[in-house]
Amino acid sequence: MFLLAVVALTLVQRVGIGLGDPLQIERQARMEASAKEVEDRNLQLKSGLYAGTKTFWKTSKQKQAMPATSDSTEGPGIMEERTASRIWDVSSTNCSANLNFTNQDWFLGLEANFKQFLLYRHCRFFPMIINHPEKCSGETYMLMVIKSMATQHDRREVIRKTWGKEQLVYGKKVRMVFLMGTSSNEAEKANHQKLLEYEDYIYGDILQWDFQDSFFNLTLKETHFLKWFSTYCDNVRYVFKGDDDVFVNVQNIFEYLEASAEIKNLFVGDVLFKAKPIRRKENKYYIPQALYNKTHYPPYAGGGGFLMDAPLVKRLYWASESMELYPIDDVFLGMCLEVLQVTPIKHNAFKTFGLVKNKNSKLNREPCFFRSMIVVHKFLPQDLINMWNLVNSNLVCSQKVEIV
Ligand SMILES: *[C@@H]1O[C@H](CO)[C@@H](O)[C@H](O)[C@H]1NC(C)=O
Ligand SMILES: *[C@@H]1O[C@H](CO)[C@@H](O)[C@H](O)[C@H]1NC(C)=O
Ligand SMILES: *[C@@H]1O[C@H](CO)[C@@H](O)[C@H](O)[C@H]1NC(C)=O
Ligand SMILES: *[C@@H]1O[C@H](CO)[C@@H](O)[C@H](O)[C@H]1NC(C)=O
């Protein structure tokens, strides 16, 4: 796929294709493509048999003939039509800077990135560039939602091959989407966009909004997802939300959820209680007093990976609407939980703030340990594949390794 991407980039540079309606039409046509079809298409793609992807790069206005398929595991057609006919109701991007406080001392003393954040803090919603209204059609047990960026193509490839595979687990449907903004690299923006459209054309698993993918805009990714989910996903039981550089053990998620079926307002992850805002300016998570002046954050789960039930996701959307955006996305979600008076559950199988204190600990490379985990950060793509293969091999573990 990397090779393909390189070829693709060359093509974009040479032909300079404009984006337009044909893509939209094609996407509609293949809305119901199942994971199996995607795999088949990839095989055909590798062997050069798949005509569709070649024509993707031509400016042809012709609608491509995609086989319209019906997935026998889907529910009745009426329901699908209903969700597919819903729309993302934001179509304008013009939100201008809020200059109300720009001459005040507390504002003038802030670092440039915080100024930028505050100027546009009131811009809540942006239009969608790539959407998949059909993603949640039919009964879906779990939707996996992963934050990613245009340049992290290799991470997405690995996730699709490993824990993010759309599949049936114990007969229950698991689906997956990536959440993306637009490339923050102005020079490469057009190329990144075209490659992303191509990637989505093949896999059909990208949601993209028209805001810049930056660290402080991660909270926008959160609120946009909450709104998107509330708009399109009525038949999902659970949502796993995570980063694109974590190891996830889907089987253990299922075991956990089966055992937790009774819990209402389920929100579980690597939860911090009484975390303090970081006041050291060198730190990535530094927050000036002017932005947050309390001594502690409400309980929140590390954004690397956490689980929630669908009704709670919808209530979180409702809560988020009443809040000002906060530049750290996982803290923001903690603030929303606080509004709902829901206390997140801390579980030791979620390790999003580092595994064990000692980086050289043998546990970091011990596959039997990963067998008993749900989420572990932080992996390079190749390391993730290697660990995945080990954990899913005929590994003999004397017992589940637990660290509590
Ligand atoms: C912004 O968009 C709104 C409609 O969404 C329109 O009424 C308004 O004139 C636009 N403003 C500018 C400056 O383009
Ligand atoms: C700026 O202040 C004016 C007057 O108080 C208010 O009407 C407006 O909504 C404020 N702008 C934003 C973006 O908050
Ligand atoms: C977030 O995205 C918007 C829209 O692209 C952009 O105007 C704004 O500067 C971004 N904010 C930050 C803090 O990067
Ligand atoms: C903290 O911030 C709030 C809201 O911005 C403000 O009303 C309050 O006066 C501040 N408290 C202190 C101690 O600075």
Image: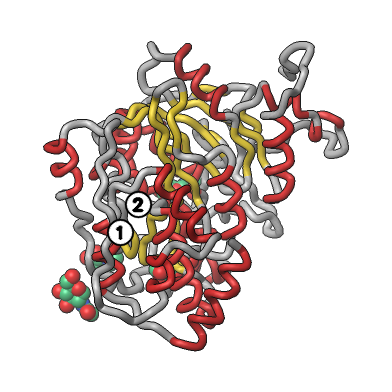
Classify 296 as above or below 370: below
Is residue 121 shown left or right of residue 344?
left
Q: Residue at x 29, y 29 (%)?
A: 139
Sequence order check, earlier mark of 1 and 2: 1
Regarding ligand 3, which quadrant of the image does it lie in?
bottom left
Q: Give the labeled residue for mark 1.
A: 125
Closer to the camera in the image, 359 or 107: 359
Res 119 seen here: no
Q: Position of residue 75 (x, y in %)?
A: 22, 31
Circle on res. 302 = none
Q: Is mark 1 within 8 Å of ligand 3?
A: no
Secondary structure at badge 1 equals: loop
Q: Residue at x 51, y 79 (%)?
A: 186
Q: Position of residue 264 (x, y in %)?
A: 36, 18
Is residue 281 shown left or right of residue 109?
right
Quarter holding residue 263: top left
Q: Position of residue 89 (x, y in %)?
A: 19, 57
Q: Give the labeled residue for mark 2.
A: 224
Q: Position of residue 33 (x, y in %)?
A: 33, 48
Quarter holding residue 349: top right
Closer to the camera in the image, 270 or 284: 270
Classify 152 as above or below 396: below
Is residue 318 shown left or right of residue 346?
left
- Quadrant in which the C terminus is drawn: top right
